[in-house]
Amino acid sequence: MIFQRVELLLGIEAINLIARQRVIIFGVGGVGSWCAEGLVRTGFRHLTLVDADRVCTSNINRQLMATTLTVGQAKVEALKERLLTINPDAEITALQKVFTAETASEFHLDDYDYIIDAIDSLKDKATLILLACQTQATLFSSMGAALKLDPSRIKTGEFWTVEGDPLARVLRRKFKRMKQFPQRKFNCVYSDELLTNNGEVAAETEGADPMFHKVQTNGSLVHITAIFGFTLAGLVVKSLAPTPSLPEGRA
């Protein structure tokens, strides 16, 4: 049985609950791809993957489905194929689309129990957060995973209390400038570490906005992006797991 160890820890009721949840992941790059893997390996069966990009060689260092064999494939399709090798009975929907304010209605956010935000674009990320917080779904969001090295500095926290993460700060400033705010609180994965690029910047990114736009290229490492993704998956699992109990003899 694939999920025997999961059931051993969480119990059969939690396993059945997990199997019924509908999860949509926006952005299946360095963070979102590992989140999807973590969820499927824990027994989640209904996942929708949203990403418009195709696998390129620069993805191979940190994205789950990116290999020399998948270069050129749609990321959502390559990831779907991978996830179905883990659980062939899973229902994986691959949407090779861009999420924007203009396309938001195509994604039917009210149909989901969990919404995972792993979007790079600042504008689209803000839109997703605002709309997700208008639904009954639970939202978990990834802040910036690039320019990090120390895994011990990765944390979780409520968005408005996050300290030391530039992306969270810029998002909060954007909401204030727009005079639009998320209608409820939500938790994030973030790190207060901020390094600088030491290598040469590719010519096509020179002069680009310094942060949080897809045209900007920043260094990133798989042990950081994967921990971000697995932590997002862990937040989902934890929200469905039974209240933990201490072993007998411990109080």
Image (tube, rainbow, N blue to C red):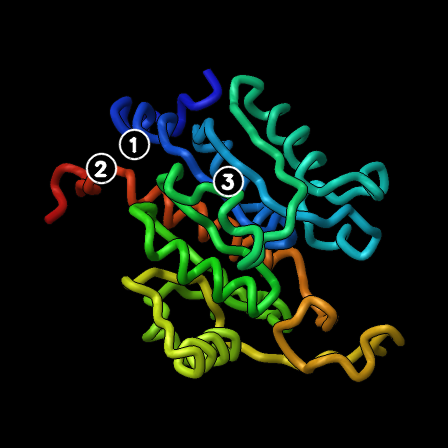
The residue depicted at 28 percent of the width and 62 percent of the height is 184
Disc 3, SS? helix
Q: Nearer the viewer, residue 113 or 37?
A: 113
In space, the residues marked 2 and 3 are separated at their CA atoms by 18 Å
* Image location of residue 159, percent across then percent down: 36, 69
Of the numbered discs in the image, which one, if any, rests on residue 195? none
Where is residue 15, by image quadrant?
top left
Task: Rate crowding at label 1 as few (under 14), some (14 to 19) or many (20 or more) other CA atoms within 10 Å.
Answer: some
In the image, 223: left or right of 239?
right
Q: Which residue is mark 1?
A: 10
Q: Which residue is mark 3?
A: 38
Tell whether label 3 touches label 1 (CB within 8 Å). Answer: no
Disc 2, SS? loop
Tell whether label 2 touches label 1 (CB within 8 Å). Answer: yes
The residue depicted at 32 percent of the width and 66 percent of the height is 158
In space, the residues marked 1 and 2 are separated at their CA atoms by 7 Å
* Image location of residue 2, percent across then percent down: 48, 20
* Image location of residue 87, percent across then percent down: 55, 22
Of the numbered discs in the image, which one, if any, rests on residue 242? 2
Task: Rate crowding at label 2 as few (under 14), some (14 to 19) or many (20 or more) other CA atoms within 10 Å.
Answer: few
The residue depicted at 70 percent of the width and 41 percent of the height is 65
User: How many labels, in total?
Assistant: 3
